[in-house]
Amino acid sequence: MSAPLPCLGYGLGLRSAYYEQILEQSPAVDWFEIVSENFMVQGGKALYYLDAIAERYPLVMHGVSMSIGGPHALDTGYLNQLKQLADRVNPAWISDHLCWSRGNAHQLHDLLPLPYTEESLYYVAGRVCQVQDVLQRPLVLENVSSYVRAASDEFSEWAFLESLSRLTDCELLLDVNNVYVSSRNHDFDPWTFIQGLPANKIRQLHLAGHNNYGGYVIDTHDHPVSDPVWALYQRTLEHLGPIAVLLERDDLFPPFEELLTELQKARTLGKLALAGRQKCA
C-alpha cells in the first residue's frame, strides 16, 4: 500500500468555469485535481469534459463527503462509486479530508473537525483501512481549517495525523492555507504543525485564499493566496523538497489568465525555495 507516489508538479483544481478554455488553450498546467463527487454520475457533460481533459493531463481525485470520522457506517455505495471513477480516470492518488461531514442520515456539507483522542484515533484508523481495502490504494487525507476545538482533545492535530498515518499507512495532503487559518483561530505556531507531520507521508500541498476578519480567519477559497501563506509555503518546500502543489479556487472565479498567473507565482516561489534547500544541503 505504500508504493512511492509521483511528484506531479504544479496543478489547478478543475472547475467547470474553465473547461472550455482548458480544452481550447491547453495551458501550461502540470495536472488537475477533480472534486470526485462532481463526476460520480452516469453520463452528461461533466464526464465528457473529464474524459477530454484526462487525455491531456494527469488527474488526482479529491473528495469532500467521505466523512471518514463520522458516527455513521461508511457508505459502501459511495465507496464503490469512487472506485469506479478511479478505474475510469486512473488518478495518481485519491484524497479526502480528516473530518466528519454527516450525521447518521444527513450530509451537512461542511468539513467538521474531530476530537483528537485515542478513542477517535483508533476509530478513524479502522475506517481508513476499510476505505483502502475498497480502493486498493492508499487514502490521502487533508487537514481541515477549524474554528472550534473539542474539550476532550488528547493530541494536537498534527500528532493525530502522524499517528493515523503510522497506524494505517495512509498518506497526507498538507493544506498550507488551512494550517495558517487554524493557527490564527487557535493561536498556535503553524510551523510547529508542519514540522510535526511525517515528511515522508506528505504527497501533496494545497494553496488557497481566505478571509481575514482580524480576530479570526475563515477559509473561503475565493481569494488569492495571502502573503503569510506564500511565506509558509516557501518554508514548507525548503523543508520537504519537491512535492505536488495544487492551487484551489472554489468561488468568485477570476479570469482564467489570472489564475494561471497565480499558479506561475507558486511555481516561481517553489523553484526559489527548492534552490535554497539545495544550498543548505
Image (spheres, grey):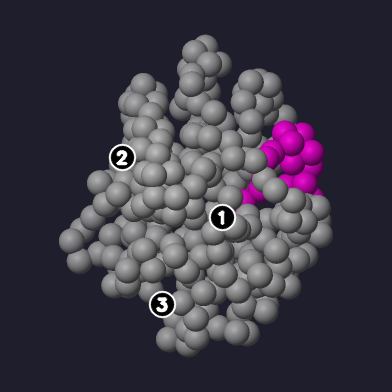
* Of residues 80 and 61, the one drawn nearer to the viewer in this rendering: 61
In the image, residue 40 lies at what x, y percent? Answer: 69, 41
- Crowding at mark 2 (Cα within 10 Å: few <14, some 14-19, many 20+): some
Residue at point 29%, 72% (across, down): 187
User: What's the amino acid at mark 2?
Assistant: Pro
Question: Residue reaching furthest left?
Answer: 214
The magenta span reads 80-97
Secondary structure at numbered mark 1: strand
Contact between labelled residues 1 and 2, with CB atoms less than 8 Å apart: no
Residue 76, by quadrant, is bottom right
* Of residues 62 and 273, the one drawn nearer to the viewer in this rendering: 273
Q: Which residue is mark 3?
A: 149
Vertical placement of 180 versus 252: above or below? below
User: What's the amino acid at mark 1?
Assistant: Ile
| Picture disc at residue 224 | 2
Left or right: residue 194 versus residue 30 is left
Query: Is residue 182 among what the camera can see?
Result: no
Q: Which residue is mark 1?
A: 202
Residue at point 36%, 38% (across, down): 272
In the image, residue 226 lies at what x, y percent? Answer: 27, 46
Among numbered discs 3 and 1, the one appearing first in the sequence: 3
